[in-house]
Image (cartoon, grey):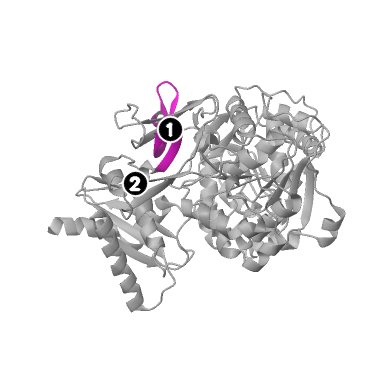
């Protein structure tokens, strides 16, 4: 018997009517200048002694945070404060919504899907699930409204994979959610936070959570494969949060955060929603879509509210460097920014250097950079570099790296090199080791698979025992899927194992090929994706897809020929080059370029696998 899905007709029809409205415009319309005048952000200084995540569960941490004055602050696209959510109000609202969730007929441990827009409602519902003993998981907002069908399919896949019993979204996205939920046998209720608020609150006792309970599911970003639901327990979560705020960031009473990171990404959810709360730190939020349109607003928040801790993925720093005008620097004072965390994707040294050079006149100190390494399967963080030391990098001989999987420090100028950023050392209670294909630990500067051991490791992938067994090795070691090497105790990540293209026995990093493309003056967007395609005869071809604005056929062919020549000179292999318009390459829900999706799209556009098979047969 199918479960009943609750969604009011007027809500669905009004939502569908809004589907063609630009996201940025919708965000701006929600702001109110009059409201901004009346509101004041939560303070940096608190009234209670600071405790650094010394709690057993997330709700226990919120109970303490609610006794102070700090909290969350949400800003609109114009930089106006549109809503304030002190931790004491968050506790009150979350507990009220928890009692309403309890009336939906779910049992303890059931999953609740939440479309994670940057709003107070999402945060309240996330904590409400934990108060009610339910397991939330965050789903992304659409990247753009042109991908309606793709987005609905993405939501449907997550609802099925997470086996959600209920699903909620703000008015902007509940129409998408209703489409994705249509025909579900498992979902008991679909609606908006406002509709949930209209339901009667049951008088059930809200039981305390246990450290071994599942706290939430975190869906991976899907940069190299389809997203999977990572199971994170309360114990793993609190272990990671304690390591982040105590050791990684060295949080103190004067700290304040500012973030544009999406709430559905682990760095945004764990790092910029949960970590500040468990340390009773105030946070200022700018929606991801608003940051993408005008990254200056994020820097303004840091400057105006004197934020000390703010994280970004490398592409966010690149966006700031490219989009912020020199004339805007005069209004910024970034000297307060002591921990500029960088992670979630490969960190290129030039990205950090360019950002530091650009914003030095605004007071940014290059020593604020804090490279780190982590992944959802280890809750979030694994390693941190040292606070206040900036970033270190190592240049290694590119040929030896490819041919011998060894990072030989560059001794002779003029040779081609690869440069890798130092991601630091593991958090307390965690161990990182690098192993060869036989699973044996390798010495320093030898490239291999990165394994992690510690209390933050996931319990597995939800309802996916096969992938869980592949990733969780004997002894509770997590195979991260990343490649790297260790030097003097620090981790250097060289890429994803799936991003290494093996051609004629040679291991070629996709990033190295992409960097060749991004160095071309015609490639103004600096976006490229390289991957390998293997035909039925086991012959691998390298493909390079590049965003480019060139329109002249002669200019385009000249660029293609030059790149093919440079790839052959650098790596001794041939490659296919495709030029596509700007904003064409697919990204994950967190904004990273997705080689997995780029490869699938290229195959669909060109039917390359069949062509290559035919050519191999002719030979």
Q: Nearer the viewer, residue 153 or 591?
A: 591
Quadrant where the image shows the N terminus:
top right
Label 1 environment density (alpha carbons within 10 Å; few <14, some 14–19, many ≥20): few
Farthest-out residue, right: 38
Q: CA distance from mark 2 to mark 1?
A: 17 Å
Q: Nearer the viewer, residue 127 or 417?
A: 417
Residue 102, percent from left and from top = 72, 32
Q: Kindly identify the residue that appears in the image at 43 percent across and 32 percent down.
A: 488
The residue where tag 1 is placed is 488
Q: Kindly identify the residue that appears in the image at 22 percent across and 49 percent down.
A: 536
What is the secondary structure assignment of the residue under circle 1? loop
Residue 104 appears anywhere in the view:
no
**Magenta-highlighted stretch: main secondary structure?**
strand
Residue 554 appears anywhere in the view:
yes
Residue 346, percent from left and from top = 46, 47
424 sits to left or right of 545: right
Q: Kindly identify the residue that appears in the image at 61 percent across and 44 percent down.
A: 268
Quarter of the image for residue 403 reads: top left
What is the secondary structure assignment of the residue under circle 2? loop
The residue where tag 2 is placed is 410
Quarter of the image for residue 14 reads: bottom right
The stretch in magenta equals 470-494
Residue 413 located within the stretch drawn in magenta = no
Residue 477 located within the stretch drawn in magenta = yes
574 sits to left or right of 451: left
Quadrant where the image shows the C terminus:
bottom left
């Amino acid at each position: 018997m199918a479960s009943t899905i609750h969604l009011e007709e007027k809500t669905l029809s009004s939502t569908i009517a809004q589907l063609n409205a630009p996201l940025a415009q919708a965000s701006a319309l929600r702001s109110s200048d009059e409201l901004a005048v009346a509101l004041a952000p939560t303070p940096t200084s608190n009234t209670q002694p600071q405790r650094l995540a010394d709690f057993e569960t997330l709700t226990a941490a919120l109970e303490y945070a609610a006794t102070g004055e700090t909290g969350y602050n949400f800003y609109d696209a114009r930089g106006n404060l549109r809503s304030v959510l002190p931790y004491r109000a968050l506790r009150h609202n979350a507990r009220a919504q928890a009692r309403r969730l309890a009336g939906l007929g779910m049992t303890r441990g059931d999953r609740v899907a939440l479309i994670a827009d940057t709003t107070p409602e999402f945060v309240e519902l996330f904590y409400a699930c934990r108060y009610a003993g339910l397991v939330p998981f965050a789903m992304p907002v659409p990247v753009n409204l042109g991908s309606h069908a793709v987005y609905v399919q993405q939501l449907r896949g997550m609802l099925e994979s997470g086996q959600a019993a209920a699903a909620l979204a703000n008015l902007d996205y509940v129409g998408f959610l209703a489409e994705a939920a249509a025909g579900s046998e498992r979902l008991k209720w679909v609606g908006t936070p406002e509709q949930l608020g209209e339901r009667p609150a049951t008088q059930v006792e809200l039981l305390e959570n246990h450290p071994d309970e599942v706290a939430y599911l975190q869906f991976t970003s899907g940069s190299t494969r389809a997203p999977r639901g990572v199971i994170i327990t309360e114990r793993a979560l609190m272990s990671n949060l304690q390591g982040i705020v105590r050791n990684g960031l060295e949080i103190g009473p004067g700290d304040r955060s500012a973030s544009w990171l999406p709430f559905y990404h682990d760095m945004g959810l764990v790092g910029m929603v949960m970590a500040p709360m468990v340390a009773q730190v105030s946070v200022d939020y700018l929606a991801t879509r608003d940051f993408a349109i005008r990254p200056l607003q994020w820097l303004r928040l840091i400057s105006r509210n004197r934020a000390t801790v703010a994280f970004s993925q490398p592409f966010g720093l690149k966006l700031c460097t490219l989009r912020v005008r020199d004339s805007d620097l005069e209004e910024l004072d970034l000297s307060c920014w002591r921990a500029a965390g960088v992670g979630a994707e490969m960190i290129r040294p030039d990205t950090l250097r360019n950002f530091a050079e650009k914003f030095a006149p605004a007071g940014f100190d290059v020593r604020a950079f804090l490279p780190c390494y982590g992944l959802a399967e280890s809750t979030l963080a694994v390693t941190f570099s040292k606070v206040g030391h900036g970033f270190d990098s190592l240049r290694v001989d590119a040929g030896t790296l490819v041919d011998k999987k060894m990072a030989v420090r560059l001794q002779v100028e003029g040779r081609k090199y690869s440069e890798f950023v130092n991601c630091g050392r593991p958090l307390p209670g965690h161990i990182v080791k690098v192993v060869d294909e036989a699973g044996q630990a390798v010495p320093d500067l030898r490239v291999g698979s990165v394994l992690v051991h510690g209390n933050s490791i996931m319990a597995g992938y939800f309802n996916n025992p096969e992938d869980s067994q592949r990733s969780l090795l004997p002894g509770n070691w997590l195979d991260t899927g990343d490649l790297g090497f260790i030097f003097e105790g620090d981790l250097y990540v060289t890429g994803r194992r799936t991003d290494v293209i093996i051609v004629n026995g040679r291991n070629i990093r996709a990033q190295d090929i992409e960097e060749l493309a991004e160095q071309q003056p015609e490639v103004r967007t600096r976006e490229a994706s390289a991957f390998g395609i293997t035909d039925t005869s086991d012959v691998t071809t390298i493909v390079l897809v590049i965003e480019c604005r060139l329109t002249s056929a002669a200019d385009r062919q000249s660029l293609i020929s030059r790149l093919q020549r440079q790839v052959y000179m650098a790596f001794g292999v041939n490659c296919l080059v495709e030029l596509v318009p700007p904003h064409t390459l697919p990204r994950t829900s967190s904004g990273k370029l997705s080689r997995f999706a780029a490869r699938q799209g290229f195959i669909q556009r060109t039917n390359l696998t069949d062509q290559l098979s035919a050519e191999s047969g002719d030979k």
